[in-house]
Image: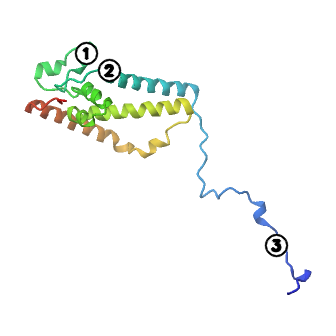
Amino acid sequence: MAAIHADSIRIIPDTAANLSHAPPAIFASPADARRESTLGRLIALGISLGCLAVLITAARLTPSPTGMETHLSLGLQRCAFHDRTGLPCPSCGMTTSFAWFVRGNLAASLYVQPMGTLLAFAAAVTVWAGAYVAIAARPIYRLLRFLPGRFAFIAVMAFAILAWGWKILLALNGWDGWRT
C-alpha cells in the first residue's frame, strides 16, 4: 500500500460549490409566472359559458333531415336568401351541423355543413380553454404560438367558401340532408 504524503496533496478551490445549481441561461427558458387578472378570468369564464350554452342549445334541437331549417325550432325566421334565390346562404345548415356535432355524428355534421363542423369544434375547444383560464388563472397565449397565425384567416375563409360551394352543390343536386 502506498503512503500519501501531505506535501503531495494539492487543494484546488471548489469552484463548483460557488455556482448555483440552475442550468446555464442558454438552456433554461424564462419562467412564465404571469397570472391572469380577475377581469381576464371573468371574461374567459363568460366566453366559455357562452360557447357551452350554444352547444347545449344544439343538443336540445332535433337535426332537420333536410340539412337546413333546424333553427326554425328556436323561433327564428326562414332564410331570406334561400327563399329568394333557391340557393343556400353561407350559413345555411350551420344549426343542423351543430346539432349533429354535439350528438357525435361527425360525418353528418361535415356532410350537412363543413364550416359548421369547424365552428362547433372551435366552440367545444373554447369551452375547455376558457374554463382552464378561469380556474387556473394561467393565460393560454403560449399555446396560440402553435397556430399558423399569418395564414389562419385566409385558410378559414377559403374553407368557408368551399363549404358554401359544397352546400350549393348539395342543394342543386337534391342531395341535401342526412337521413338517419
Mark 1 vs mark 2, CA separation in Å: 10 Å
Mark 3 vs mark 2, CA separation in Å: 77 Å
Q: Secondary structure at mark 1?
A: helix
- Residue count near mark 1 (Cα–Cα under 10 Å), binned few <14, some 14–19, many ≥20: few
Write down the residue under mark 2: 60
Write down the residue under mark 1: 73
- Residue count near mark 2 (Cα–Cα under 10 Å), binned few <14, some 14–19, many ≥20: few
Q: Dividing the image into 4 quarters, which one contains the N terminus?
A: bottom right
Q: Which sits in the foreground, 175 or 116?
A: 175
Residue 76 vs 130, above or below: the answer is: above
Counting from the top left corner in percent of width and height, residue 108 is at 23, 34
Q: Amino acid at mark 1?
A: Ser
Label 1 or label 3, whichever lies nearer to me, is 1
* Numbered label attached to residue 12: 3
The quadrant in which residue 164 appears is: top left
Q: Secondary structure at mark 2?
A: helix
Residue at 19% x, 16% y is 78
Q: Would residue 60 appear left or right of 41 to someone viewing this image? A: left
| Chain-order first, disc 1 or disc 3 | 3
Counting from the top left corner in percent of width and height, residue 166 is at 17, 36
- Residue count near mark 3 (Cα–Cα under 10 Å), binned few <14, some 14–19, many ≥20: few
Asked if the residue at tag 2 contacts the one at tag 3, i.e. Cβ–Cβ closer than 8 Å, the answer is no
Q: Would residue 168 appear left or right of 41 to someone viewing this image? A: left
Residue at 37% x, 31% y is 123
Mark 1 vs mark 3, CA separation in Å: 84 Å
